[in-house]
Amino acid sequence: MDEKPQAAIEDILKRFEKAGYICDQHIATSIYLSQKLDKPILVEGPPGVGKTELAKATAELLGTDLIRLQCYEGLDESKALYEWKYGKQLLYTQILKEKLRDLLEDAQGLEASIDRLHQFGDHFFSDKFLEARPLLQALKSEKQCVLLIDEIDKSDHEFEAYLLEILSDYQITVPEIGTIKAKTKPVVFLTSNNNREMGDALKRRCLHLYIPFPDSKREKQIIQARIPDIDASLRDQLVEFVQQLRTQDLKKLPAVSETIDWARTLMLLHADSLDADLVRNTLNIILKFEDDIDNMDIEIPKMIAAAKKAARA
């Protein structure tokens, strides 16, 4: 009998935590359902909340390879799916030309020559000359892998059409060869920063998972998992400070990865508590626009006081 769903989900939570990825019940449930339903997961949310890290942690959890396709504007099938090895094809035609006379030496007439040619396999468009790109690599993998299609929202609408066959049937059709089916179905993640709306056809083929910025409790757990030696008081103060920053009107809100970087920075500086000079000298670690840094300068003392008060609560 299969393991009870809730027990399996709790096991996923524990295994992710052991791998250093702190997730919640919603994320663990989505992973469980993806495995049981053989469906890809479309992970949406603001930049820096751990969407890419989720795929990496899943690969580590499963003890398998991660194959990553980074999307960008203008991405096409030659970079994502496959490409022909044109240089080797050219060498093949030269070799074939040299051997052609021997092949047709005793053939009488045009029809006989054509029949003779058809006796030999058409290797020009065959798997021997096919250069597999990330999507095809995942389908051809002998063991189950994790396929990460990262920042799908940066690609063109046309590229989504190339993905539909893979996302629904775990196969790809190469016109010159035919249909190539997955040897083992990969675990597929698509991530999006919501730069544009995904098409309905793509969404129908995926489970949807939205990851928001974590609340202070979970962000503290993340910092503790990634930087176990950090002082608890400093950890709580910096997390509460970042939580306040995310309520401000900033060009770019601090990502979780930037909170981790700031925590490491403060530890390198042997800080044990936040103060105005320390924050001003390191604010560029979590804020990436000079206007944001300038606008927050006057608010720093007040935010530090609020962070310390929240950390003590």
Image (cartoon, rainbow, N blue to C red):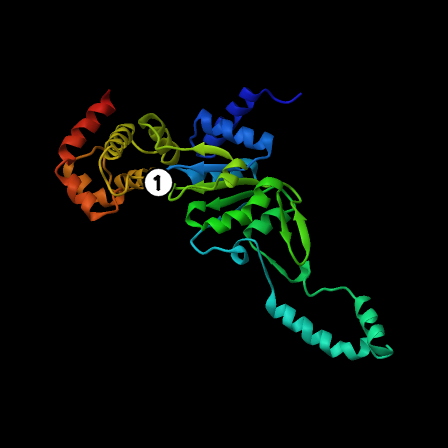
Quadrant of image for the C terminus: top left
Tell me residue 94's x, y (percent). 68, 76
The residue at 23%/45% (across/down) is 284
Q: Position of residue 247 (x, y in %)?
A: 24, 32
Residue 281 visible from this viewpoint: no
- Could you tell me if residue 247 is visible in this image? yes
Residue 162 image offset from top left, x and y in percent? 55, 49
Relative vertical location of residue 13 with respect to residue 81 in this rendering, above or below: above
Left or right of 88? Residue 231 is: left
Q: Residue at x 36, y 40 (%)?
A: 48
- Along the horizontal axis of the image, is 313 left or right of 16? left
Check the picture and name the quadrant holding the N terminus. Answer: top right
Q: Nearer the viewer, residue 94 or 67?
A: 94
For badge 1, the amino acid type reads: Ser
* Along the line of sight, the residue nearer the viewer: 99 or 12: 99
Disc 1 target residue: 257
Place residue 211 in its image quadrant: top left
Residue 83's image quarter?
bottom right
Tell me the SS state at disc 1.
Answer: helix
- In this view, the residue in front, 264 or 141, is 141
Residue 298 or residue 250, whichever sits in front: 250
Is 215 left, or right, of 199 in this rendering? left
Farthest left residue in view: 298
Q: Say which quarter of the image contains residue 113.
A: bottom right
Residue at (36, 36) in percent of width and height: 227
